[in-house]
Image (spheres, rainbow, N blue to C red):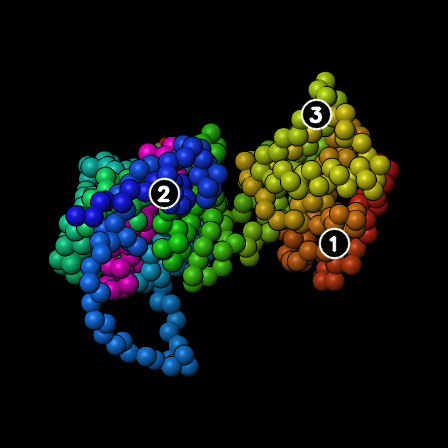
Amino acid sequence: MARQKISFICAQCGTTHTRWQGKCDGCGEWNTLAEEQAGGGVGGGHQRAPKKGRPVELVPLDGEQEQAPRIQTGIDELDRVTGGGFVRGSALLLGGDPGIGKSTLLMQAAAALARRKHRVIYVSGEEATGQVRLRAHRLGAADSEVMLAAETNVENILATLADGPRPDFVILDSVQTLWTDSVESAPGTVTQVRASASAMIRYAKQSGAAIVLVGHVTKDGQIAGPRVVEHMVDGVLYFEGDGGQAYRILRTVKNRFGATDEIGVFAMGDRGLAEVPNPSELFLGERKGNTPGAAVFAGMEGSRPLLVEIQALVAPSPLGTPRRSVIGWDSGRLSMILAVLEAHCGVRFSQHDVYLNVAGGYRISEPAADMAAAAALVSSLAGLALPADCVYFGEISLSGAVRPVGHSVQRLKEARKLGFERAVLPAGTEEIGNQALRLSQPETLVDLVASIAGS
Ligand code: TYD
Ligand code: MG
């Protein structure tokens, strides 16, 4: 008999290694490799004589167009992130840290869909039905016609789903608890999680139900993380937030049927998640007067403008190598802005520790935040507060030039709506519209620094 092949699979990213090693070649994480038996599951398999293929139907590309049929929850923050509702016959992964509110969000979505006369099944592998009921009660969803099951075996789940009317929406909470008889690995291993996910995805495609797989972000290598199934599903959403704060951000990472830069904002309360239709107010909520080092960035998240405060603290450093610390922004981007400020504007940070923080635990990924970050840094170093009624946006290039960014009109409108009077944006921004804001348009970072020093 052939010897069973053993491989070592990273629980974070799923990269397969032939030998054990401390660090994963794929994602660079330490101690995430676990020994698994190859074969049986997806991509593996015992050597069998190949069966004779059967021809499939070929269809022309230019055929009848099918709109992705969607089911909407009516929860706007959720529907926007999915690109207009869950798509029938598709599989979505909802990832996030344990305790962030994934089960809560999905129970609310399930209840909303059930009220709209969709047939919804919630399969919990983590909690007993009693516990799920208790949560539903707390969410005011107990009266909705969601059907519950506490089960982890994929074959049993599939048999249950096949028995009775076809569901529209199925939640599997969580994918890490699922296991299928078709592979031998233990539940939670990469092979098992992938094989189980694959069986459920196949079910979604065949039945036309929309399914959601919940995946906990795992910290160690014992249990596979949600990333190992990302490539198999049609959409990936991550639910993020700071445990200490009430709000949560739902972010699209992958979407075969819509945009990937959308976010939904929720606040966790004692009766579940409430939508936050105007997140700018939330992120600017605690703004107090004029303090040096704070600049408001007029950002965009997908189709929505979002104002957030960028805070900088620049303080003389006792260390030979001063500290650079960033929360909510890219540290490489900070280094770049500091280098441009030093090289082109003669502003020196080499003797100073620099801390940069995006207020409210929010994370910025747009280069358009450069200008606000630079303004905050210069303001803190100089000890001069920026005008409290001013917003900033614009990208900074290595040459020190300030470059226009998209969606200027929307950014300015949002600022106006929230009571801001002034905006600093790049010269050469073409579309500005007729804004009732006082605009200042620097051409270079030198102009920006001069205007802060002169204010
Ligand atoms: P949960 O949805 O169980 O998280 P996950 O499925 O991502 O692990 O949410 C758990 C947390 O949310 C828990 O700390 C309690 C809190 N919570 C509320 O604050 N209000 C509520 O109405 C509910 C249901 C949960
Ligand atoms: Mg849960």
The amino acid marked with disc number 2 is Thr
Please give the residue where the numbered disc 3 appears in the rendered image: 322
Circles 2, 1 touching at the beta carbon (< 8 Å): no
Work out whether mark 2 precedes mark 1 in sequence or the reverse, and give the earlier one.
2
The amino acid marked with disc number 1 is Arg
Please give the residue where the numbered disc 2 appears in the rendered image: 18
Circles 3, 2 touching at the beta carbon (< 8 Å): no
Closer to viewer: mark 3 or mark 2: 2
Q: Quadrant of ligand 1?
A: top left
Task: Quadrant for residue 48, please give it.
Answer: bottom left
Q: Position of residue 11 (x, y in %)?
A: 37, 40
Crowding near the residue tagged with mark 3, few <14, some 14–19, many ≥20 C-alpha atoms within 10 Å: some
The amino acid marked with disc number 3 is Pro
Real-space Cα separation, disc 3 to disc 2, in angstroms: 42 Å
Residue 409 is at least partly visible in this image: yes
Work out whether mark 3 precedes mark 2 in sequence or the reverse, and give the earlier one.
2
Work out whether mark 3 precedes mark 1 in sequence or the reverse, and give the earlier one.
3
Q: Position of residue 451 (x, y in %)?
A: 84, 42
Circles 3, 1 touching at the beta carbon (< 8 Å): no
Residue 177 is at least partly visible in this image: no
Quick check: 345 above or below 403? above
> How many marks do you count on the picture?
3
Q: Position of residue 33 (x, y in %)?
A: 37, 37
Magenta stretch in the rendered image: 195-223
Please give the residue where the numbered disc 1 appears in the rendered image: 403
Label 3 element class = loop
Question: Cβ(mark 1) to ligand 1 < 8 Å?
Answer: no
From the viewer's perspective, tell me whether residue 36 is left or right of residue 13. Answer: left
